[in-house]
């Protein structure tokens, strides 16, 4: 699915217009503001707000993305095939841990929260044990790479487009809670000062958590700005 550029009187109206064209909701896209627009004065001048809306589910894979989809010709998974793919993913994780000589318990569960990838992933593979820090890495970078590898192997073995998330020692749950609290604190600062705040660069999955945490906030709007690994979330006052 391609990204959509849309224009309207306000940023919010432009986003809504693009979402209608894509048939997606706010939790499934990344938004970049091209222009906040300018109001017309006495019927003259002015320009519309312009945005680009990109579907998250088709974003080109990076080390943080849940994993690459299978070939375009792969069939959409049925419930039985999806369950089989999840079992395959659990087996893949166990095999990789065995190769790494890591002792851990591996289970699967349905995704529930944005941090789990709800709406994007079929299941979360939980890895629990002792001394798992090396599998998480600095700010979850090793875990992101491990998750990518799991999905790469899953796509090849199952021949489906099933994607899974991987959590180690509850790291993603803790990180999600921290990001949600950060988003709410920064939103309050934006509301009280009227000034926009830009957060540090984040991978797509973490930007999505921030976007969803503030999606229904009455006073602020979130958008993604920047390119590649420098992409970050800006929290701005609603205009």
Image (cartoon, grey):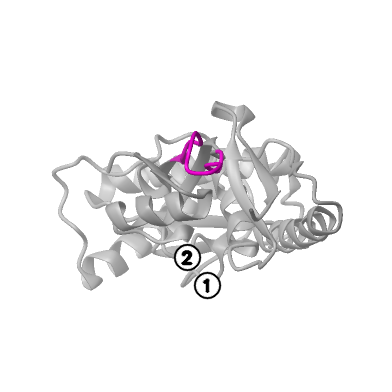
x then y, percent, for residue 77:
21, 61
Which quadrant is the N terminus positioned in?
top left
Left or right placement of residue 31 versus residue 192 in this view: left
Which residue is drawn at the image coordinates 62% and 51% (left, top)?
222
Res 118 label: 2
Q: Is residue 97 visible?
A: yes
Res 218 label: none
Residue 176 located within the stretch drawn in magenta: no
Q: Earlier in the sequence, mark 1 or mark 2?
A: 1
| Front-most of residues 178 and 169 | 178
| Front-most of residues 31 and 42 | 42
x then y, percent, for residue 137:
71, 40
Residue contact at pointers 1 and 2, CB within 8 angstroms: yes
Left or right placement of residue 180 versus residue 155 in this view: right
Q: Which stretch is magenta?
A: 38-51
Give the residue at mark 1: 112
- Where disc 2 sits, the SS reads loop
- Where disc 1 sits, the SS reads loop
Q: Is residue 103 visible?
A: no
How packed mark 2 is, by other alpha carbons closer than 10 Å (few <14, some 14-19, many 20 or more), is some
Which residue is drawn at the image coordinates 45% and 55% (left, top)?
13
In the figure, 110 relative to 159: above or below? below
How packed mark 1 is, by other alpha carbons closer than 10 Å (few <14, some 14-19, many 20 or more), is few
x then y, percent, for residue 28:
43, 56
x then y, percent, for residue 63:
53, 35
């Amino acid at each position: 699915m391609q990204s959509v550029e849309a224009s309207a009187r306000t940023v919010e109206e432009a986003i809504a217009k693009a979402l209608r064209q894509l048939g997606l909701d706010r939790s499934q896209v990344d938004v970049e503001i091209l222009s906040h627009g300018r109001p017309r004065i006495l019927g003259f001048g002015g320009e519309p707000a312009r945005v680009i809306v990109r579907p998250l589910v088709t974003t080109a894979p990076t080390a943080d993305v849940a994993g690459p989809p299978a070939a375009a010709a792969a069939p959409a998974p049925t419930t039985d095939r999806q369950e089989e793919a999840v079992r395959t993913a659990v087996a893949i994780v166990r095999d990789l841990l065995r190769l790494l000589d890591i002792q851990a318990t591996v289970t699967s569960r349905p995704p529930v929260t944005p941090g789990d990838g709800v709406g994007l992933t079929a299941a979360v593979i939980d890895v629990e044990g002792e001394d798992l820090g090396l599998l998480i890495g600095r700010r979850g970078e090793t875990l992101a790479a491990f998750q990518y590898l799991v999905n790469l192997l899953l796509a090849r073995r199952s021949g489906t487009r099933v994607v899974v998330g991987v959590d180690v020692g509850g790291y993603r749950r803790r990180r999600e809670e921290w990001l949600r609290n950060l988003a709410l604190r920064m939103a309050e600062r934006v509301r009280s000062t009227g000034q926009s705040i830009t957060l540090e660069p984040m991978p797509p999955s973490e930007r999505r958590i921030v976007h969803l945490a503030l999606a229904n906030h009455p006073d602020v709007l979130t958008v993604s700005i920047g390119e590649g690994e420098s992409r970050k979330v800006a929290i701005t006052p609603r205009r």
